[in-house]
Amino acid sequence: MFNSVNNPFNRQIESSTSSGDGNQHRQREQEQKERKLLEEEEQDEVKIGGRPVLSEDEIKYMVNEYIRKIKAEHENDSKIIQKADKYLEKFNIQKFMKNNPNITAPDFYIIMYSETEYITR
């Protein structure tokens, strides 16, 4: 309605067409409600790359799939299959998660490659 040119002293000017304090009061209440909602919302965890952290069950599944793929790629080499089975037997999920906290899927594949590299040699 009025800007600083029309209202040089920055006083509240009410006109007969505006709803006055009632409209401003409702607007302030709405802004306060929105602020409260924003403050109450949980803080989103932001991970590098935006990937979610893997759960224990997801890691178990991914380890089994990773070893299964190694075995499938080397199905004619019994030595590699034995090494893969031995790795899977000795795999300790708690130790793995303790050594690699907050692991994401890309991290998992990098770690598994380095841990199982000896199998295919």
Image (cartoon, helix red, strand yellow):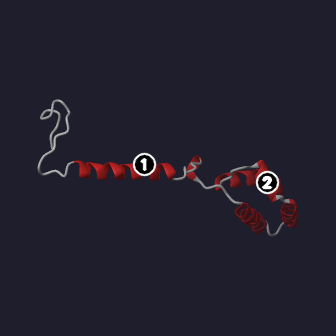
User: In the rendered structure, which amino acid carries the disc numbered 2?
Assistant: Phe
Instruction: Tell which of 86 and 43 is nearer to you.
Output: 43
User: In the rendered structure, which amino acid carries the disc numbered 1?
Assistant: Arg
Instruction: Tell which of 52 and 28 is nearer to you.
Output: 28
Task: Determine the image quadrant of residue 92.
Answer: bottom right
Q: Which residue is mark 1?
A: 35
Q: Whole-percent x and y of residue 120?
A: 81, 57
Circle count: 2
Horizontally, residue 37 falls left or right of residue 61, namely: left
Task: Determine the image quadrant of residue 108.
Answer: bottom right
Residue located at (65% from left, 53% from top)? 106
Horizontally, residue 33 falls left or right of residue 107, namely: left
The furthest residue to the front: 21
Q: Which residue is mark 2?
A: 96
**Label 2: how many residues lie within 10 Å, few (<14), some (14-19) or many (20+)?**
some
Q: Whole-percent x and y of residue 67?
A: 77, 64
| Residue 13 seen | yes
Above or below 58: residue 49: above
Q: Quadrant of the N terminus?
A: top left
Residue located at (36% from left, 49% from top)? 31
Q: Whole-percent x and y of residue 121?
A: 83, 55
Task: Determine the image quadrant of residue 14.
Answer: top left
Residue located at (15% from left, 30% from top)? 8
Query: Is label 1 in a helix, a strand or a loop?
Result: helix
| Residue 121 seen | no
Q: What whole-number distance in Å separates the C-alpha atoms at marks 1 and 2?
A: 42 Å
Q: Whole-percent x and y of residue 12?
A: 20, 39
Instruction: Tell which of 21 and 43 is nearer to you.
Output: 21
The furthest residue to the top: 9
